[in-house]
Amino acid sequence: MGGGSDDAEDQISCKSRKGKNYYLWKFSSSLMKLLLFLVPLVVLSGFLAILGPKFSAINLEFLSSYAVSVNSSFPVVSHAKLQSVENLHPSPTVVVVPEEAVAVVGVHNDTAAPEQKKFISDGNSQSSTQELNATREMETRNGTGIAELTNNLSNNAAHQKLGFTNLERIEAGLQNARGAIKEAKNGNQSHDSEYVPIGPMYWNSKVFHRSYLEMEKQFKVFVYEEGEPPVFHNGPCKSIYSMEGNFIHRMEIDDQFRTKDPEKAHVYFLPFSVAMMVQFVYVRDSHDFGPIKRTVRDYVDLIAGKYPYWNRSIGADHFMLACHDWGPETSFSIPHLAKNSIRALCNANTSERFNPMKDVSFPEINLQTGTTEGFIGGPSPSKRSILAFFAGGLHGPIRPILLEHWENKDDDMKVHQYLPKGVSYYGMMRKSKFCLCPSGYEVASPRVVEALYTGCVPVLISDHYVAPFSDVLNWKSFSVVVPVSDIPNLKRILTGITPRHYIRMQRRVVKIRRHFEVNSPPKRYDVFHMILHSIWLRRLNVQIRDDQSSITS
């Protein structure tokens, strides 16, 4: 350091002693160096202008059928200028997802309404398709594609040299993951020393496995640190809403998927707990959602003013998580939160605008003691003497129908509003072949996971319910799905399942329940990782482009 300083002083003193000829020579030399630098730069700029379309491949449709391109052409709004996120009216470019292709692994839901066949309804889908076709034509004409772009981006030095933005690098990495997942469909099963998902419980086990491995390899989540507990960064870790607190806690201490650098994140987590807002913000018995909605609006206003990421994607790469029944209603606090963002909900009700293409259904788990210790496990099928079991109060419109038809009506159908004294609820589940899981006031029921934990084949009795992780899991292979209208026919439906088929279903229940287990710390493929994987899938189905970014040399 000292030598550098001395050299600088030496140069100054030397310059003061040089004559006129020296400075003329110095000027000529500098001019020649400048020309030698500018000429290649001009040539390179012209070259980039001609081949410019090849560098806009970020806007390509994912796998020609699975993507939504969000063209965020509006300026980033500063906190000083931002009045409310509701006042934003961006016009993103939207690619409508074909009905036959709903996700990387696939959302298989028969109840999805036609209007749920796209992620974001802003913009003109016809012009978006035209833009996409034009992009493809340019790509073909220039003899390049996303593969070349991602190859160019594989080296970090090349990133900086070519001037790609962080967002473009993230999108290129996601495109690599999409390609790997697509190849897995017809390829060999990926190696995994711990667990390899196989069997009819999965829509496509190879694709799910590769997608999961890609998630482990690159998925990063940024958790906003703004907000004060208990409403933010906190949540219940017991009761039927326990998954809110469990996920928030695990996400915030995670060192694999969480990143502290928002520029490296694929998604951004809004860490508020609806259950805690109901407890601390909502005025009991007021039937007024206003305070909760204002809390959410103020929070999103804050992070939208402080960071550029919400405005950049109109919330499409942000997610909220709620297990409380009021989760969907809370999301309607901000139109773009409900319409664009990923909503991870226990209350996954398509009649209440749950969109299985964009939103995530995760299980409601009643952790009475905060852990699953003592709840998991049950006897083999041969030791289950009861055909079907249910016990529960008159909660919602479906249970009264179930009790009316089956309470104390049949010895094979153990249906009770109140269990006889001394009879164990979980003991009855372990003795039963099938466990009836009717919806309450909302579609989700903790009985579904309780059945899986005890090795009892769940019978889902509901309408408009998207079962947890149904983008990956084929529920009809290990459960019985019954519409409410078929409650009178329950015994006929269950006795119509052959013993051989029942044994297969029961064994599948035991195999897949790992995906619903709550572990501390989390284990691969458990419920924490399955929630993340469902969010990862939705992020893979969205491509975000910031038109403010440009290629620099």
Image (cartoon, rainbow, N blue to C red):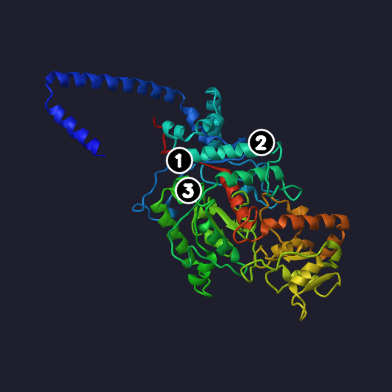
Residue assigned mark 1 = 166
**181 or 255: nearer the viewer:** 255
* Residue beneath the point at 82% across and 54% down: 504
Residue assigned mark 3 = 314
Q: Position of residue 408 (x, y in %)?
A: 82, 75
Q: Amino acid at mark 3?
A: Ile
In the figure, is residue 484 to the left or right of 214? right
* Residue beneath the point at 69% across and 62% down: 449
Mark sitting earlier along the chain (3/1): 1
User: Neighbour class for label 1 at 10 Å: few (<14), some, many (≥20)?
Assistant: some
| Closer to viewer: mark 3 or mark 1 | 1
From what the image shows, is residue 438 above or below residue 156? Answer: below
Can residue 304 be seen from the camera position used here? yes
Q: Amino acid at mark 1?
A: Asn
Q: Quadrant of residue 209?
A: top right
Q: Amino acid at mark 2?
A: Glu
Q: Position of residue 344 (x, y in %)?
A: 58, 56
Q: Quadrant of residue 129?
A: top right
Q: Position of residue 435 (x, y in %)?
A: 77, 65
User: Neighbour class for label 2 at 10 Å: few (<14), some, many (≥20)?
Assistant: some
Query: Farthest bottom residue?
Result: 421
